[in-house]
Image: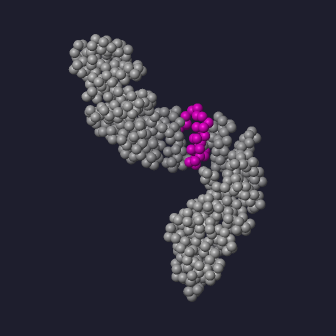
Amino acid sequence: MNFFHRGNGGSVFLLVGVLAISMVGLPVSASAQADGAQAAFEQALGLLQNGKNNEALAVIDSAIAAGVSDPSLYNLRGLANSELGRDGEAEQSFRTVIRLDPKSPMGYNNLGVLLSKLGRLEDAAAAFRKAQTLDPKNFTALLGLGTCLEALHKPAEAAVYLQRAWDLHPGDFQAGYELALALHEAKQPAAAKKSVNQISAPQDPESAVKYYSLAGVVGEELREFGEAADSYRRAYAINPGSYEIYVALVRSTLAAGTAPSKTVLPSPPENLSASQNLALGVLWSSGGAYEQAIPRFEEALRLDSANDSATVNLALVYKNVGKTPAAIDLIRRTLKERASAALYNLLGGLDEESGEFVEAVQSFQRAVELDPNNEQYYFDLGMEYLSHFTFGPASEVYRVGTQKFPRSSRQYLGLAFNHYAVREYAEAADAFTTALEIDPESPAVFQAWKTLLSFLAPKDWDALLPRLDRLAAAHPQNAELAFAYGAALFRLEVSKGEQGAFDRPQIFLEKSVRLQPDFPQAHLELGGLYAARKQDEKAVAEYLETIRQDPKSDVAHYRLGQVYRDMNKMELATQELDRYQELSRQHQEELKESRSAVKQFVLSQGAKPSE
């Protein structure tokens, strides 16, 4: 979004008008006073000021034809030609001014104005830079050079010259505005705000809109959203047809934290397109202002009834305001007109929430049939089966899903949980580990993998250890992968009885808590390793740390009680075992109340862009 575009073919904002006024006010040079040049200059100047450019040119050309070779007359000639759109003649005249009076900044400044109007910003900057070299305190040269550099995307350099212009003419709107804009583009919002606060909005409506828009942008950058919204509101009041300003007003108002029910804004611009209404609706709904989003989505659909995105979003906001039947009705009506995988998939979710489980499965299946290359649809269909314990169909969906989308970790998670649910732990371990290999940095994937620790036989770990070893080696700073390999290796070594070797798993488990001290399960596992080595004091310390980090860990209390008993600290052992019994009962009750725990866990894993 660009509130600060430059018109006139790339010319600097407002600069041409400012410089033209300053140029025509220049006194005639001494040489012009000879041979009637003074009279020609004054006559042409008067005609120019009255908008009679052709008549002024006639006077100037007549004087030049009579032998007058004066930079001031050529300067007026350039201005007149520029006003008439004769840019080539104007450039030639200003270059003649430079040739006749190379030590004066006048010709360079006027040439810079013309070139900036033509979009030749590099050449314009060079002209202004020459003028500024001749006269370091020339306001016009400083302003022109700074504004050109800003347009050339050199904001830090531009700010230097614009600051000098401001220091020469403090209070000048043009210098202050351009300085604030350069500072904003140089990523210095605090300094930009200071400059904005030093000037006031001008009477000119176009300039006032730019001023308030810049103030709004700077406010957003400083996260002063209330002030930003106020500035955008002022800009929009002057220019109520600006879609960009209205979007900024909505965005900053929502960011200010105003309750959606109390968010009262002016009406949006008229005659918005379907895509503009859709974008506004998405902006409102993303901020939780669902009631405000509804008319925008409805208007987008009125303008483009085949817009699936508008239909989906409207259905979602209906649901979010408690109108799920209206959402379902909207989608079903739309599906009678045309088949849409996205709409069937959304309908499946709405049917599921409404308790229509059979219809939900049918909708999810239809989405897959219409778009078999969409990973999301396979995932949702599998989850619908899995959440209702229909493990056979779920297994088939995720088997196909993992083949079609081999880089989707959540397809493997779905498959793994399905195996886990039917106690196929080795198969679950294989799928969980594949998910971990696809997305080794994901804490959620690691949480899923941890569910296996207590269910695998020693022979199962044999197949997984090389894969976990490679993962840990490839990500040496990942505490969770160090834990995964260390815990798996420890479980295998424990199964060997007295022949178990604990040095290597100890290295990895200690590494995991060193990399991530706040890691209760790693402390728990390390405590078990110390206990297996009869290092009771170390084991107690790890179990206590586990409990400190996770007070509801029933296993930690149980194991700590066992170690205390081995140390003949019977009173402490009894306390810990009693606490274990209490927590264990609570966990059993929680399990009974969370029938959909698996579904909720996997659903929380959003698809990555690659999926």
Q: Is residue 476 left or right of residue 590?
A: left
Q: Residue at x 29, y 19 (%)?
A: 73
Q: Which residues are magenta?
A: 266-292
- Residue at (64%, 60%) from the top-left corner? 435
Task: Confirm whether the magenta stretch covers residue 495.
Answer: no
* Residue 558 drawn at (x, y percent): 61, 78
Q: Quadrant of residue 504?
A: bottom right
Residue depicted at x 50% and y 41%: 248
Quadrant location of residue 141?
A: top left
Depicted 398 relative to depicted 544: above or below: above
* Residue 329 visible to an observer of this rendering: no
Residue 516 location (% of width, % of height): 51, 67
Q: Residue at x 44, y 28 (%)?
A: 8
Please give left or right for residue 177 compared with residue 292 in the image: left
Q: Nearer the viewer, residue 318 or 248?
A: 248
Residue placed most toward the observer, 19 or 243: 19
Q: Position of residue 260 (x, y in %)?
A: 56, 47
